[in-house]
């Protein structure tokens, strides 16, 4: 069964460092998303991406965040200068055109 | 924007009992309500969903009900089994396609089914 894969599963970084989280969506999917979940809190929408551009972004997705689909298969989330409050589980999701989002297993980011 | 509240935050039941999780939403324009199950170390997985033109939907031991007037929807699991133990998230969505598939999630319910 096709699945969304994310790497790394866990990354520890120092405050101020750049982090790139990688996702490989399901191959025929067209819409891509990043969500995050701070420990004990809700899963929150960050950004949606379609046709090589951002469709919508939340207030959380400020200038420190960027997304890219560099090669037609990977979908990356970059945090330019990490802050303590960026520590969270980051989920990538994709869909073809139905409403069902397929989520990856997440990348846990710990900022020290 | 949309706000989704979910209760209870934790729920413990005996195997074979039923479990009910309730959610409310704030935006009357929301028209799609999925439920996701998240097992330890995994991403959320869709288990059932309901659209606003339907009041109830059932899939084997799982059912979802929707009350548009009251803006609440519920997940019902009957004959619970230990493998039902997980975190369950409700979500709400408005829009008809593509980039509008942004989901607003509830805070999650940790369901424990005791053998």
Image (cartoon, coloured by chain):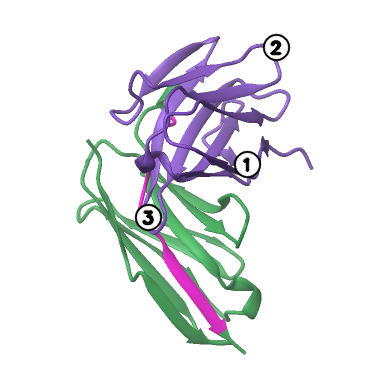
Chain colours: A purple, B green
Instruction: Judge whether A41 appears above or below B74 on screen.
Output: above
Does the magenta-highlighted stretch encompass residue B64? no
- Where residue A101 sits, quadrant-wise, is top right
Secondary structure under the numbered disc 1 in the rendered image? loop
Q: CA distance from mark 3 to mark 1?
A: 30 Å
Residue B10: give x, y in percent of width and height: 39, 74
For disc 3, the neighbor class at 10 Å (few under 14, some 14 to 19, many from 20) is few
Q: Which mark is residue B55?
A: 3
Residue located at (20% from left, 56% from top): B70
Decide which of A111, B74 is in the foreground and name it.
A111
Q: Is residue B70 left or right of residue B63?
A: left
Residue located at (71% from left, 23% from top): A28
Q: Which residue is mark 1?
A: A104
* Mark 3 or 1: the one toward you: 1
Secondary structure under the numbered disc 2 in the rendered image? loop
The chain letter for the residue carrying disc 3 is B
- Where residue A65 sits, quadrant-wise, is top left
The chain letter for the residue carrying disc 2 is A
Q: Which residues are magenta?
A: B101-113
Secondary structure under the numbered disc 3 in the rendered image? loop
In the rendered picture of this protein, how many numbered marks are placed on residues? 3
* Mark 3 or 2: the one toward you: 2
Decide which of B56, A35 is in the foreground and name it.
A35
Q: Are marks 3 and 2 in contact (CB under 8 Å)?
A: no
Residue B61: give x, y in percent of width and height: 58, 71
Quadrant holding the C terminus of chain B: bottom right
Residue B28: give x, y in percent of width and height: 22, 41
Q: CA distance from mark 2 to mark 1?
A: 19 Å
Q: Which residue is mark 2?
A: A71
Are callouts 3 and 1 both on one chain?
Answer: no
């Amino acid at each position: 069964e096709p699945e969304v894969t994310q790497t790394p599963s866990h990354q520890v970084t120092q405050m101020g460092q750049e982090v790139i989280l990688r996702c490989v969506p399901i191959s025929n999917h067209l819409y891509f998303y990043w969500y995050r979940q701070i420990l004990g809190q809700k899963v929150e929408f960050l950004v949606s991406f379609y046709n090589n551009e951002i469709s919508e972004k939340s207030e959380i997705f400020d200038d420190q965040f960027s997304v890219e689909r560099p090669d037609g298969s990977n979908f990356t989330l970059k945090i330019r200068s990490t802050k303590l409050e960026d520590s969270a589980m980051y989920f990538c999701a994709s869909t073809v055109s139905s409403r069902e989002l397929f989520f990856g297993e997440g990348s846990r980011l710990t900022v020290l | 924007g949309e706000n989704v509240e979910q209760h209870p935050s934790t729920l413990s039941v005996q195997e074979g009992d039923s479990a009910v999780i309730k959610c409310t939403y704030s935006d009357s324009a929301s028209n799609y309500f999925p439920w996701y199950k998240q097992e330890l170390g995994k991403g959320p997985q869709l288990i059932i969903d309901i659209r606003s033109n339907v009041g109830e939907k059932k899939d084997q031991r799982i059912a979802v009900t929707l009350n548009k007037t009251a803006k609440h929807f519920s997940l019902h699991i009957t004959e619970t089994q230990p493998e039902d133990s997980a975190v369950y998230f409700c979500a709400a969505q408005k829009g008809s396609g593509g980039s509008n598939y942004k989901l607003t999630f509830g805070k999650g319910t940790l369901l424990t089914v005791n053998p």
